[in-house]
Image (cartoon, helix red, strand yellow):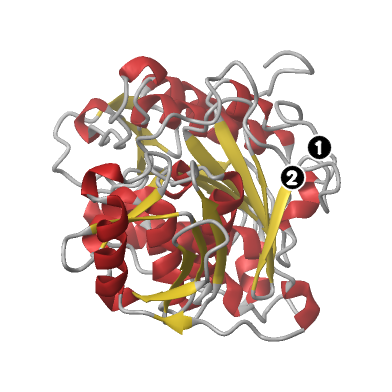
Amino acid sequence: MKKLQLRLTPLFSLFAGALLCYGASALPASAITLTGANGKAVAFHLIKQATPKGLTAQLVADGPVIGVTWDKLDLAALERDQKLIFAAYERAIAGETIDLDLGEGMTGDPAAPPASDGSTPPAAAPETARFPGWLDTKVGKIDFMLQMPVSKPRGILLISLDDFGNSFRYLYGAQDRAKGPWAEFQTKHDFALLSYDSHSGDQGRDPSKIDEFIYADKGSGRALESALGNFATKLKQPELLELPITIFASERTGAAFGYSYLNYKPGKILAAVISKGAFYDSAPRPETAKVPILFIWGEYCRNHELWGSENHAETVLAKAAPLKPNWTNGREFRGTSDLNPVMEYFGRQYLMEMIKMRLPAKDAGEGTTALVEVDRAAGLRGNVETGETSKIGDATVALGEEETYLPNETIGNLWKKFVMGELEPPGPGGR
């Protein structure tokens, strides 16, 4: 098979030729319009790939494949008008080649009408998918899996579990959307589910040796963003790139990656539950202190000593205290290192409360996607030893050594039962 030879043509010449043929007012309405560094716009029939050098594209159907170098594009206009292509640009200049195959009518413009009006489900995984009911993509060594909600997504729930990086194994049976343990997130809150298999277990089972996957700033964070870019391109839904991310993370590798990722991109994180883990090595800072986080850890858990990690829930909470963080100390009464239905129930309820607090209502209208900032002064303080709660009052004053922040009364009531060993999750069908 012959290798396709690309002709890198200056975009200015392309624009001039196109404008001579069509005229600026005659650009096809359904075409993909790009703005050049010279301020002129050209309509393309197809954008094929984003490469480190630039885009490959066709001006017209059955026309030659041409090259458009990045320096000939108005990148500010690209970021504003073509979210999918701009996301591909950011990955391409780092060395990737991304198949886009964006044709007429698939511009990736976030202002364009969605593919579904909510009465029919958006694109789902094909019947021949590797994991039925899920889309999948591979970035480097990491496999990522995504399951869309039935209606237009309003957020993403990152499910980051497991001791050795195979988080997705917990979700194998959840083939149908709106069913399984995370159904309420998908149906009530319209969240897409995202998980992964990092293949960290390939490096052995020594608990004291941690894979670099857990450190989001060393590549895995960018891999997750690349995966979202791949999914957005496959689904032709650029809004995936802008959605806030909620994190449910647990165990050795899963909790460590969840904590590292929220430190990597704190501005995108709606809230997080980090439980029964360690290797919380990213230092707390003002940006991360604003993110609502529930740390769940067992009162009698000594896993961090077995793993050789100095940074676990107790120590990171102490380090963050001077920053007056929106973080909650969820010390499980007589808890061990094991997961259990009580802590999982508490974690889910916490996240659902944070979604209601921080995500604009569904009927708020277009353009209201920014997360609502937490009003710390409206929260509660809780005493971890006694379970007592009271109003914070002056939010500028740091809490005491045995005190913790509670975002609202609902969480305060659940937290009190949890730290006192009195919380009982509802039975089947009781949610």
Q: Secondary structure at mark 2?
A: loop
Question: Disc 1 marks which residue?
Answer: 175
Q: Determine which of the numbered discs, if any, sits on residue 98 in the image.
A: none
> How far across and down, in percent of the image, does residue 345 sit?
64, 31
Label 2 crowd (10 A; few <14 / some 14-19 / many >=20): many
For the point 50% across and 44% down, the residue is 106
Q: CA distance from mark 1 to mark 2?
A: 7 Å
Instruction: Choose top left, top right, bottom left or bottom right for residue 379.
Output: top left
Closer to the N terminus: mark 1 or mark 2?
2
Left or right of residue 367: residue 247: right
Instruction: Report the quarter where the N terminus lies.
Output: bottom right
Q: Do labels 1 and 2 touch, CB within 8 Å? A: yes
Whether residue 281 is visible here, answered yes or no, is no
Question: Disc 2 marks which residue?
Answer: 134
Q: Is residue 208 above or below residue 187?
A: below
> How far across and down, in percent of the image, does residue 30 sit?
43, 40
Q: Amino acid at mark 2?
A: Trp
